[in-house]
Image: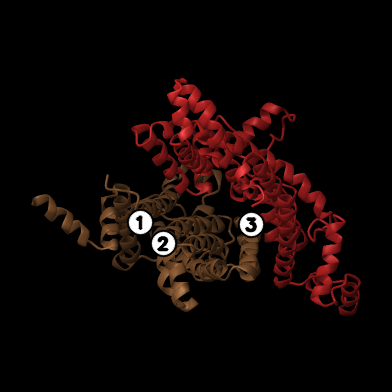
Chain colours: A brown, B red
Amino acid sequence: MKSIKKTASTKTKSYYGDVLDKLFRHKLAIGGIITLALILLAVLLLPPLLKLDPYTTSRGIAYTKPSAEFPLGLDSLGRDNLARLLYGGRTSLIVGLLSSCVSLVIGVPLGLCAGYFRNGVEAIVMRLVDIFMSFPSMILIMVLVSVIGPSLGSVVLVIGIMGWPQYARIVYGNVLSVSSKDYVEGAVAVGQSRFRIIRDYILPNSFSPVLVTTTYNTASSILQEASLSYLGMGVLPPEASLGNILNNAQSLTTLATRAWFWLPPGILLALIVLSINFIGDGVRDALDPKMKYR
Amino acid sequence: MARYIVKRLIVTIITFFGITIIVFFMANMAPGSPIDYLLSDPAMTAEEAARRAAQLGLDQPVYVQYFAWLGQLFKLNLGFSYRTYRSVSDMVFERLGNTVVLTGSSLILSYLIAIPIGIYSARKPYSIGDFAYSTSALIIMAMPNFFVGMLLIFIFSVKLEWLPMSGMYSTNASRSMIDLLAHLAMPVLCLAVQQIGNIMRHMRSDMLEVLSEDYIRTARAKGFRERRVVYTHALRNALTPMISLFSNSLPFLVGGAVVTEQVFSWPGIGMLMVNSITARDYPVIMGITTIIAVTVLIGNLLLDILYGILDPKIRYS
């Protein structure tokens, strides 16, 4: 009797309830969610609470060591390092989220069309994917941002535009495999419209791979922005970015004697990317119906 | 097989034209035309600049300029740098070698480290070792390249004083192999650690898949020793997908070390690119992007053909 009840209760659980359940059993994903939430809270709440100001220069002698007033010291222009660190973290999160949205908005429809309409559309979209993938993305991003003019907006846009081929590829492959399923062929046979077939069968089936791609893409966009700003070609000072803080730390004296200056932005960047990747792993495993509870 | 090669060749040619169009119009969109550049010389009058521009074909419509540029491209003439007045192809090819030395050694090193770890993890999945390797790979992959570079310089140049922190050769010493290796060590390590994780993951999942195949069970049933089963029967089949992984790292091989080259002042393509972008030296920027894309295209074509030969299942598809 007891065992029957148990199976009955698991059967009533919805698919997404089951997914959430699996996600919350994934220890690394939980760690990632908690870390990212803490970083998000710190980045959003600490600046107004502590009345931090990342822009005012000469608040003391350049490179003042950490003290009670400035817990992470001052930078080369006498700006508050803690404030710049938190604002830099904001920049990273904004770039990561917005640019993967841009990639998604371009890549998903193109992949859908390529996979569904085949023939001409497929040839054009997949050749475009080939073209984009044959460039080292960093070089193309550098050129495009400098052509448009470096700013937070152009960085988001360019990194977003460069990320679309991954979405298109994933969705395209998925559409091909879903289209050959019996229930889709059945729907075609009954004479349902193409729009309905895409909306009711193909899009819901593409949801999980797109979600997984989005998490990983967010992480790599954050790294690309940091690299670009480190090279002095992305988000430019006085705007703070974890990359341009580290650009400031390139001199040998800073590297050798002021670890309090360059370690925190690097560690914060690694923590953000790592926790997003852990969440991505968790989401991937949770959405995979073949993975059972461990 | 011949049909497959012809088909791939046609696709490659189409892609090549797509790339040239993108590169040309990207540079054309850029602010600061060559005429402005000519006018930046105080001795230049507006009439003289217009005459020079006409000489350079800059008064023609954009598509005419594109075909003129494309024609020169086929003659391997990539134009001249605005900054150094040298031929772009000379500038690019003398740097390309330095970059390939760096990225090539890092690729070799990362495959040499990642393949054994991948095999180990596949033989003992979900073991403590497997978990430790995959977690540390994830942590390193989460760190930006330049931060890893800064940490390496901090440890090996500042604290231990073992390795030189920048450049390709020491300025005062003669150009010896040992000197080159000492300069190469940190940038190569910096690039390699970032790739090990990815290669390792692929190797692990390919090997796991192969190890569950019927022919492996047959080999085991025949009583072959485990070593022989893993290293001859399984490994050969698990390595084939690694070719497509390698072809994905081709763009990296020619132009993927931009940031690392900057951290260690390595005189490669990436540094040339950064300097050219800062100076808005468009002929060089166009030259680098075209050469990189074409190298990648040709490399992909060759690897696809090789893949077609090695894996009979994808022929004629």
Of the two numbered discs 2 and 3 on the same chain, state the one appearing first in sequence.
Answer: 3
Residue B1 position within the rendered picture, expressed as x and y whole percent measured from the top left: 72, 47
Label 2 with label 1: CB-CB less than 8 Å: yes
Discs 2 and 3 carry the same chain letter: yes
Of the two numbered discs 3 and 1 on the same chain, state the one appearing first in sequence.
Answer: 3
Chain letter for mark 2: A
Q: CA distance from mark 3 to mark 1?
A: 34 Å
Q: CA distance from mark 2 to mark 1?
A: 9 Å
Secondary structure, mark 3, is helix
Q: Which residue is mark 1?
A: A287
Mark closer to the observer (2, 1): 1
> What amino acid is at disc 1?
Leu
Residue B281 position within the rendered picture, expressed as x and y whole percent measured from the top left: 74, 61
Res B262 visible: no
Residue B51, picture quadrant: bottom right
> What amino acid is at disc 2?
Leu
> What amino acid is at disc 3?
Ile
Q: Nearer the viewer, residue B254 or A146?
A: B254
Residue B226, picture quadrant: top left
Discs 3 and 1 carry the same chain letter: yes
Residue drawn at the location 70% of the way across and 72% of the way down: B29
Q: Which residue is mark 3?
A: A139
Mark closer to the observer (2, 3): 2
Residue A118 position within the rendered picture, expressed as x and y whole percent measured from the top left: 59, 68
- Using residue A1 as the reference point, say whether residue A289 is left or right of it: right
- Using residue A5 as the reference point, say whether residue A271 is left or right of it: right
Q: Which residue is mark 2?
A: A211
- When the figure is inspected, residue A49 is found, relative to residue A255, above or below; the finding is below
Q: Nearer the viewer, residue B22 or B11?
A: B11
Chain letter for mark 3: A
